Image: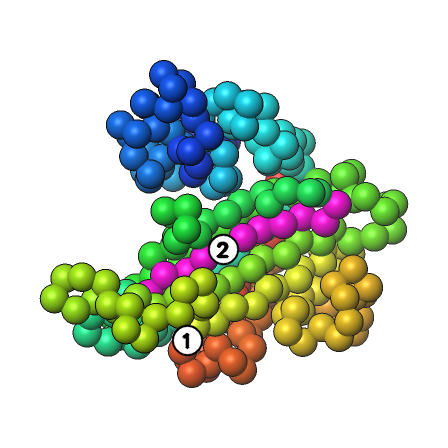
């Protein structure tokens, strides 16, 4: 059996641009789709996947998309796999409150978003709200050192935007009495540089522009003794602690990918 770890699925989340049968297909399948396939049916469980705001086919479809090309290029020919996890996250258990995370992943030098899970696109990351510590996988990225845009002496850089939102219900219906549209309870971006070492910094703590930011100081230390696996935990900014707790952090796991 072909191992699922060698399978990559590109999941579309934009039904509006799928104009097959004059858009009838998109109407029938519904918003939670790429216009032809429901999001939850568009990937192999256990396989690697990326969500992009593209339709199933057509001028703006997955097949001809820059997002598809760049994701597959790195999956097939990359040399690093980076997994990001929201670790030890004890979201408060509040009756009638649902917690969600929105995640966007960008790679330096590319004019597109490589991975995007948002409530607006019907695919946020659902977070547990039991009050117990939990680890929530956010995304897996594949990087290729040969594709660094500014020469071989620069790091591979990607940015992981994390937004935490809470939704309240009353009698089975969403309550908007204290709702601020498009406003998250927490919103920040982790900028990660991978080279001879690995550095990470939250955008809210970076002075000036991100393009001018250069990693400095001691790189993150490996917290895993296994050969071929590198793990580090990055604390969340102080602004997240009242929501996610003092123990919550982003766990980065980097492994060789061939």
**Front residue of 231 and 51:** 51
Which residue matches tag 2? Answer: 103
Which region is colored magenta? 99-109
The quadrant where residue 143 appears:
top right
Q: Residue at x 50, y 39 (%)?
A: 52
Asked whether, in this view, residue 173 is left or right of residue 63, the answer is: left
Q: Residues within 10 Å of mark 1 (few under 14, many from 20)?
A: many
Magenta stretch, overall SS = strand
* Percent coordinates x, y for residue 46 in the rendering: 38, 39
Q: Is residue 228 visible?
A: no
* Percent coordinates x, y for residue 184 in the rendering: 45, 68
Q: Which of the two labelled residues, at mark 1 and mark 2, occupies the earlier sequence position? A: 2
- Of badges 1 and 2, nearer the viewer stands 2
Q: Which mark is residue 219?
A: none
Q: Are marks 1 and 2 in contact (CB under 8 Å)?
A: no
Q: Residue at x 43, y 38 (%)?
A: 13
Which residue matches tag 1? Answer: 244
Q: Residue at x 70, y 43 (%)?
A: 110
Q: Residue at x 87, y 51 (%)?
A: 153
The quadrant where residue 112 appears:
top right
Q: Residues within 10 Å of mark 2 (few under 14, many from 20)?
A: many
């Amino acid at each position: 059996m072909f191992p699922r770890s060698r399978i990559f699925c590109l999941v579309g989340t934009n039904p509006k641009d799928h104009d097959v049968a004059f858009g009838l297909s998109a109407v029938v399948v519904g918003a939670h789709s790429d216009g032809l396939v429901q999001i939850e049916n568009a990937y192999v469980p256990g396989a690697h996947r990326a969500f992009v705001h593209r339709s199933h086919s057509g001028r703006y479809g997955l097949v001809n998309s820059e997002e598809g090309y760049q994701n597959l290029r790195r999956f097939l020919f990359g040399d690093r796999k980076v997994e990001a996890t929201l670790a030890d996250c004890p979201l408060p258990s509040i009756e009638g409150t649902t917690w969600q995370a929105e995640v966007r992943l960008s790679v330096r030098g590319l004019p597109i978003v490589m991975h995007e899970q948002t409530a607006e696109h019907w695919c946020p990351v659902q977070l547990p709200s039991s009050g117990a510590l939990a680890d929530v996988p956010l995304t897996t990225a594949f990087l290729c050192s040969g594709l660094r845009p500014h020469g071989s002496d620069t790091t591979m850089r990607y940015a992981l935007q994390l937004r935490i939102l809470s939704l309240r219900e009353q009698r089975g219906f969403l309550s908007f009495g204290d709702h601020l549209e498009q406003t998250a309870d927490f919103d920040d971006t982790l900028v990660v540089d991978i080279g001879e070492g690995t550095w990470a910094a939250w955008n809210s703590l970076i002075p000036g522009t991100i393009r001018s930011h250069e990693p400095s100081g001691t790189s993150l230390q490996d917290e895993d003794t296994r050969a071929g696996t590198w793990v580090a935990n990055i604390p969340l900014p102080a602004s997240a602690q009242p929501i996610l707790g003092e123990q919550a952090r982003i766990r980065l796991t980097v492994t060789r990918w061939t």
